[in-house]
Amino acid sequence: MKVLIYGATGMVGRAVLRECLIDPGITAVQTVGRSATGLSHPKLVELVQSDLTRYPETINDLRGYDACFFCLGVSSGDVGEDQYVRLTYDLTTAVARILAGLNAKMTFVYVSGAGTDSTESGSVMWARVKGRTENAVLALFENAYMFRPAAIEPVHGEISHTRSYRIAYRVVKPVLPLLRRLFPRFVITSEEIGRAMIRVARSGWPTRVLESIDIRDCARASRTSAART
């Protein structure tokens, strides 16, 4: 399997990249972003460009991939509504349309968030925008999966680019393992989200929208399958 990863320098993207590089069933990984990851690996190729919605000379670099893990995101608390829409809905759907035009059969995994509003009509701005984004991606790919993690415990040194998230993680870091045991439906690890993405790309999943508990179950299914093989 060959995969694309958007946002590989962020907390979730970095975790997904790690799991892809150590998975023997993944033969090639290409990251796409505005900056390089700084990593070197025989399976890894990096496409760095400032505009992620236009590929006038590099479009062929996006061909031939089986899955895309879209991990780019921004906190609504750090930007205004117009910018949030541009960086969430506009950017995601622009990339999704390009990739669907190249291979509509590929698996597209979009990292959304717990509380996303699929009706697009609720009172919370970010939830509406995320819901609108999810619905657009689901319409483009028959093999699209929406990941809605609530809280993520970084277990391999991943760091969020979002300032508000970094502050929050510093505050709760000492108790995250305990919270994960007490509230398994809401707290997952960065490793689990990476393994779950690979699992849905490889084998699918019964539902196209995965909440935290579904992501954990999917990651466990991935470990079970690996143990059997």
Image (cartoon, grey):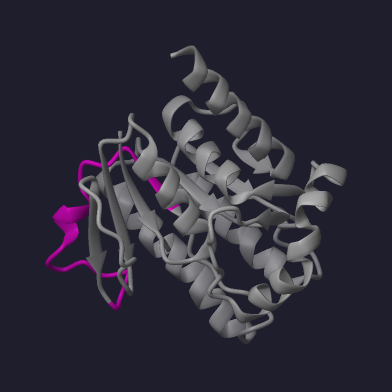
Q: Magenta part of the protein: which range?
A: 50-69
Q: Which residue lies furthest to the left in this view?
A: 57
In the image, residue 222 sits, relative to residue 177, either above or below, namely above
Instruction: Depth check: give the residue in front, 48 or 167.
Output: 167
Instruction: Depth check: give the residue in front, 98 or 2.
Output: 2
Q: Which residue lies furthest to the top in this view?
A: 228
In the image, residue 118 sits, relative to residue 56, either above or below, namely above
Q: Does the magenta stretch include residue 51?
A: yes
Q: Is residue 90 left or right of residue 79?
A: left
Task: Confirm whether residue 141 shows in the render.
Answer: yes
Residue 76 location, x and y as percent? 66, 77
Instruction: Depth check: give the residue in front, 175 or 142.
Output: 175
Residue 193 location, x and y as percent? 57, 45
Q: Quadrant of the N terminus?
A: top left
Task: Confirm whether residue 76 shows in the render.
Answer: no
Residue 86 location, x and y as percent? 50, 76
In the image, residue 219 sits, relative to residue 34, either above or below, namely above
> What residue do we see at 53% from left, 62% from top?
158
Q: Which residue lies furthest to the bottom in this view?
A: 80
Q: Which residue lies furthest to the right in this view?
A: 182
Q: Is residue 45 magenta?
A: no
Residue 126 location, x and y as percent? 69, 70
> What residue do we see at 60% from left, 47% from top?
147
Residue 208 falls in image quadrant? top right
> What residue do we see at 29% from left, 78% from top?
50
Principal SS element in the magenta part?
A: loop
In the image, residue 213 sits, relative to residue 189, either above or below, namely above
Q: In which quarter of the image is the C terminus?
A: top left
Q: In this view, does 3 lie to the left or right of 185?
A: left
